[in-house]
Every structure is written in C-alpha cells, then in structure tokens.
Image (spheres, helix red, strand yellow):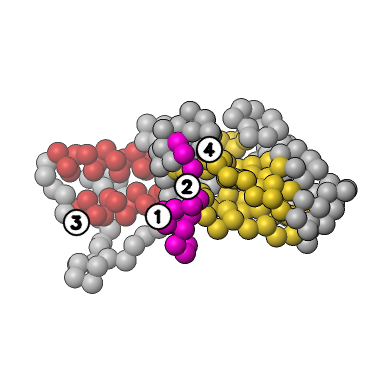
Amino acid sequence: MLSTNARTGGYALTTAASGSGANRSLTGLSPNTTYLLTGWAKVANAGENLAIGVKGFGSTETYTNIATTSYTQAAVVFTSGSANTTATVYCWKNSGGSGAGYCDDLAVEPLASAANAVTNPGYETGALTPRTQSTGTASGVVASNARTGTYALRRQELGRNRDLPAELDDVLRTAAHLLHHGRRHHLGRDLLLQELRLRGGPLRRPHPDQAPLTRRPIPGRKT
C-alpha cells in the first residue's frame, strides 16, 4: 500500500512490474447468489495488463483486464456455488511488464437479478439486430477478435478515401482549392459547416464576437 496514485482517499494498492498483486478473502456470501465485483485500476505503461478478478467461489475464475494509464473501472459478475459462502478477489499485474500497476476502491455487492437487459449482448446471432448502424461508420459483426463466443462488433469510421458522398467529396476538393490560394476565413468556416451537416455531426454556436456564418455556394457547382 502506498500513499501515492490513489483514486480516492490517501492510499492505493501498488503492484510490482511483473507477476505481482494482492488477494483478499471474502466471507459471508450466500450460496447460489449473483454478485458484482467492481474496482478501479490503471497501469504505469499503457498496453500492459492489470487484472481485477475473483476466484474460489464455486465456479470458473473470472476477471477484467485494465490497460490504461488513467483510472478505469472494471466490473465482474459472478455467481457463488450451491455450497459456497466464500471467495477471493484480487488485483494482479500480469507477467512481462516493466511498470507498476495500481488498484483502488474495490467493492462487492449482491445483484437482485443476473438477467441481462441487453438483447443480443455478445452479437452471437451474427448480426447487429436489434441495433442500427451509426451515421458515419462502417460497423459490422465479424467472426474474429471475440472476447467470448464467436462474434464481435467491429466499428470502423468512414475514412476520407472510402465511400464518400458526392456532396462531401465536392466540399473537400473545394476546401483544398481555397487553402491553396490562401482564402481561408469565412469560406473555410462555411465549408466546415457544410461538411458537418453532410456527416450529421453537431453544429457549434459561433463565438459572440464572430460575424454570423452564412452559407455560400461551392465554387463550380450549380445551386
């Protein structure tokens, strides 16, 4: 325990760089009861893994890995066995790293219901249904990179070199022309607004000191 890198309070658990951590035994659990383990963790080096998990509760050990350099919450659902009233929770820095790991604010609480309210949560139907694809993305369900099961959602933003709408293509080409000739001020802002409208993105209010933005025709296009 160190008095640095705490998320709340004055102390946090700090692990060594590789193959290090701490366990804590839980007692007084009820058999055949579903619990939620939560905790906050971070690592010194991005991409290295630190696990918050639980074992010894009458079923398969389960955990969540954290690989971020700022505190991120981990959540693990587990159900005690028919004769189990104890479990062990842990914070563990996996082998092979070169930086420390940190854990803080762990908690375990019973859940009234283990039912998942999300339909098709693991995309195991092989389709997005009942979800719909977000505007400006090329999301799809793929039979690869799944954490569990067979399928996972792959989210991919539409790049500027792929499947651009004709209107947006015109905007980008015109913006490049204006930049080349040094005309950037009002026209550049107008073109940005047009691009945001085409993408369906948010429009910000102009600063009070700015002149109102007016929509101008794109050079070379008929209106």
Marks 2 and 1, how far apart at CA: 9 Å
Q: Earlier in the sequence, mark 4 or mark 2?
A: 2
Q: Are marks 2 and 3 in contact (CB under 8 Å)?
A: no
Instruction: Please name the predominant secondary structure of the magenta segment in the image.
Output: loop
Marks 4 and 2, how far apart at CA: 9 Å
Where is residue 169 drawn, in percent x and y?
34, 38
Q: Earlier in the sequence, mark 4 or mark 1?
A: 1
Discs 4/3, front: 4
Answer left or right for 62 relative to 215: right
Q: What's the amino acid at mark 4?
A: Ser
Where is residue 162 drawn, in percent x and y?
42, 32
**Residue hosting label 3:** 186
Range covered by the magenta-colored residues: 1-17
Q: What's the amino acid at mark 2?
A: Thr
Where is residue 209 drawn, in percent x and y?
19, 70
Q: Are marks 2 and 1 in contact (CB under 8 Å)?
A: yes
- What residue appears at the point 80 percent right and 49 percent down from the top-left corner? 80
Q: Earlier in the sequence, mark 2 or mark 3?
A: 2
- What residue appears at the point 29 percent right and 51 percent down from the top-left corner? 192
Q: Nearer the viewer, residue 100 or 119?
A: 100
Q: What's the amino acid at mark 1?
A: Thr
**Residue hosting label 1:** 4
Marks 3 and 1, how far apart at CA: 50 Å
**Residue hosting label 4:** 20
Residue neighbourhood size for the residue with mark 4, other residues' Cα within 10 Å, grouped as few (<14), some (14–19), many (≥20): some
Secondary structure state at the residue bearing disc 1: loop
Q: Which mark is residue 14?
A: 2
Secondary structure state at the residue bearing disc 2: strand
- What residue appears at the point 13 percent right and 48 percent down from the top-left corner? 183
Rendered image quadrant of residue 206: bottom left
